[in-house]
Amino acid sequence: MAAGYAALLLLVFFAQSYLIYFPQRKITFTPAQEGLPYESVAITTVDKETLHGWFVPAPVEAKGTILFLHGNAGNISHRRDYLLTFYRLGYNTFIFDYRGYGKSSGSPSEAGTYRDASAAWQYLTEIKAIPPSRIVLFGESLGGAIAAWLAAQKDAGALVLASVFTSVPDLAAELYPFLPVRLLSRFQYNTIDYLLSVTCPVLVAHSPQDEIVPFWHGQALFQVAAEPKLFLTLQGGHNEGFIFTRKEWAMALDDFISTRLGAPSRSSQQLHF
């Protein structure tokens, strides 16, 4: 039994990346399929990986720009409803795949995803010449840790954390209580520590029914976030409780962002979900 447990520890230690990242290479959707105008973008990271993304402009003068950092599974083509929601609310959206996802080169790693986020920020601020104060960092699940890291480095207009964990070791300790995961973990993604250095407005959205990232993670993140901040209670499981699911959640998101960016929010009559 001791030998078997030791073998399990070794397996978990060396195979952690397979427990963290679930990339898919095949692109199954493009914005054009929903009639959205978009630019296919290739950006280069400081360590020479090439990332693929889409820039979807707002239908009229943009109220701001969403830099979307997706979760650990799939790729950008699995975020159709986010693109539609941001478009309808009147925001530009830049969504990209981390290294190893979709059409992006390389293999994912924690340090690599941070470099990828920095490259995406550089694209928006330097190539697109968008002022940092007009950029909203939106992080979904694992992407929330990356977004919080970036927000601690840059002066973004706002940060949105949707169904995000406090840290990988915290989450792993709940998922694998029979393992000394805090000693074994080679990944941190320490969202709660990054938030301590974030000065922009923060919106935290989480569901009490989230079966993968327990509700207390969202509550803990909200507690340490600086004002101004807002907590949005969602409903449904981790892969069901999305902000775009209900119009009132999308409206709350828009009201929070537009207020912070000094832009008019959309009325519920203008939105068609």
Image: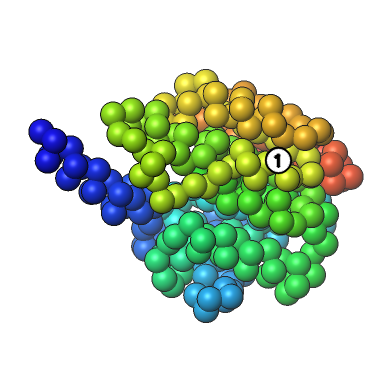
Q: In this view, does 197 lie above or below 93?
A: above
Q: Which of 213 and 186 is in front in this view?
A: 186
Q: Is residue 91 left or right of residue 120?
A: right
Query: Which residue is found at the position 28% from the left and 29% from the top?
Result: 178
* Extreme residue toward the top, this view: 208
Q: Which of 118 and 137 is in front in this view?
A: 118
Q: In which quarter of the image is the N terminus?
A: top left
Question: What residue is pinned by disc 1?
Answer: 196
Q: In this view, does 156 lie above or below 131?
A: above
Task: Bin the neighbour count of mark 1 within 10 Å (Cα to Cα): few under 14, some 14-19, many 20 and up.
Answer: some
Image coordinates for residue 202, horizontal then vertical, percent: 73, 38
* Extreme residue toward the front, this view: 2
Image coordinates for residue 193, horizontal then vertical, percent: 63, 41
Query: Which residue is found at the position 13% from the left and 35% from the top?
Result: 2
Query: Which residue is found at the position 61% from the left and 27% from the top?
Result: 220
Q: In which quarter of the image is residue 242?
A: top right
Residue 31 shows in this picture: yes
- SS label for mark 1: loop
Image coordinates for residue 109, horizontal then vertical, percent: 44, 60
Residue 37 shows in this picture: no
Question: What amino acid type should be assigned to the residue bearing mark 1?
Answer: Leu
Q: In which quarter of the image is residue 46?
A: bottom right
